Image (cartoon, helix red, strand yellow):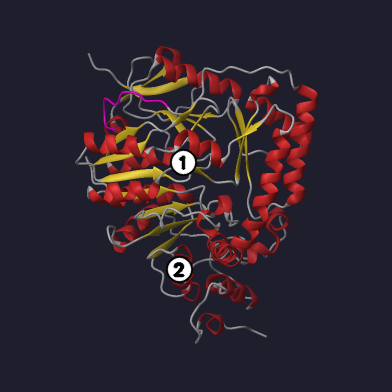
Amino acid sequence: MTVSVQQVTQKEQPLTQQDMPLYNALQCYAKSDPTPFDVPGHKMGAQPSPLNNMMGNALRFDVNSMKELDLLSHPQSVIKEAQLLAANAFGADEAFFLVNGTTVGILAMIMATCAPGDELLVPRNGHKSVMDGIILSGAKPVFIQPEVDLHFGIAHGLSLTAIQQAIAQHPNAKVLLLTYPTYFGAMSELSQICELAHAHQMTVIVDSAHGAHIGFMTGYEDALACGADAVTTSMHKTAGSLTQSSLLLMQSKRISKEKMQKVLGMLQSTSASYLLMGSLDIARRELALFAKPRYASLKPLIQQAIQQIEEGGHYEVLTAKYLKEKFAQEHDFTKLVIRVNRLGLTGFEVYTLLKENYHIQMELAEGYVVMAVITMGDAEPSIQKLVHALQDIEQKYAKGMTVLSLHVTPSTMNELVLLPREAYYAEHDTLAIDEAMGRVSADTLMIYPPGIPLVIPGETITADVISQYHYYNKTIGNVLMETSVKHHITVVKEHA
């Protein structure tokens, strides 16, 4: 029997969070068993291939835009309905599906709010996409140093005091960009920060890549609830959608929906993946219906795990109590940040041991810490597997000493001598990085994860930048640069 898509999409009853309009339309189209003479070329998996083995039934949902499945760049039916449900679930005026990850959302937020030359207040430990958005928009970045935690060797969020000082020094700044929560789960005083920024006629945009779940946990407020004007969040990171699928959420008081849609139309693919969009529809439903009880069940399991991890005396876990006392910031308990250097090992070494000896893939390592991300996909068995592996490492490797490191934070404050856009479009030379001290970078030199640049276009390359480059290149071997020549960097050409 052939099923009509219209039977699914035309509902008399109002949509609720139980509904998945886009997913249902895709399912209905797949069941109608069409003979495709459109793209994509695999024709819904018509011919046997390794792709079929990898994707299975998913190829039936990897289809082209058409009337009954709507169009992301101009949504009128099922995508529009799915986005409205997402907006409702997150308490936003508008929601936009993103198929190029949170990166494209950050680019869009900056380009929709910053004209060339506008001052943008931004944390120095912002993601690379923030720097790319600055280049594309022509904005002038005003960097604010985040709170640096020398004990754990990481950076947290911006303090209210630091933002007050930045606004006082740059009263004409148009936009404030924040990260909430940070990669390591720190959450600054965002409600007060938003009130302060709005009082100075500034728009607040937020990179919430690691916080899709925050508003669905009892006792927490997400960035929108705190007053942010636009937020981009990676549903794939913590909410269970497919990798590269995200949401851009906004309030319409200070930002025009039409302008945001126009910018997204410039940046996003015109061949938007229905697999990604369908997964967003499903993940939104899971969050709205089930997240609160699931996180309530996870919290005591995580608390028990922290107690077990710390019992031996060689580990210390970042907690809300510690962050509140030291930095006046809250903490997302699903980010398990474990200080390991009392073992006599670095975080990089523990990360490798967990991966090679216990088949446990951690989210990241730093000089002092490793981090695990807990989501609704976890339960007691997976959490306890990590606990037991850490305890076993402690028994086998603990040396009763502290590993010292000169590289305790992923952020650095360099002198900005050209606007990033000016440096990007200037004439360039390529030099060995050891010969580049004092030159103006035309490159973004970034450690990944977590995607934080050591230097960006327009900044002076310092001895500290070069030292950190060699440190991270040696320890994690994953420093991203735009030049293809090993250990070289692109700089602005100097004219005689």
SS class, disc 2 = helix
Residue 280 or 292: which is nearer the viewer?
292
Q: Nearer the viewer, mark 2 or mark 1?
A: 1
Q: Tell me the residue that label 2 is attached to.
A: 88
Q: CA distance from mark 2 to mark 1?
A: 28 Å
Which percent across, then down, holds residue 293? Answer: 63, 62
2 versus 368 height, above or below: below
Q: Is residue 162 above or below residue 213?
A: above
The answer to if 415 sits in the magenta stretch is yes
The answer to whether any part of residue 96 appears in the image is yes
Residue numbers of the magenta segment: 412-419
Q: Main secondary structure of the magenta part?
A: loop
Asked if residue 131 lies left or right of residue 287, the reply is: left
- Residue 328: percent from left, percent from top: 44, 39
* Residue 487 visible: no
Q: Quadrant of residue 337?
A: top right
Amino acid type at image mark 2 = Asn
Residue wearing tag 1: 329
Mark 1 crowdedness (10 Å alpha carbons): few <14, some 14-19, many ≥20? many
Residue 470 falls within the magenta-colored stretch: no
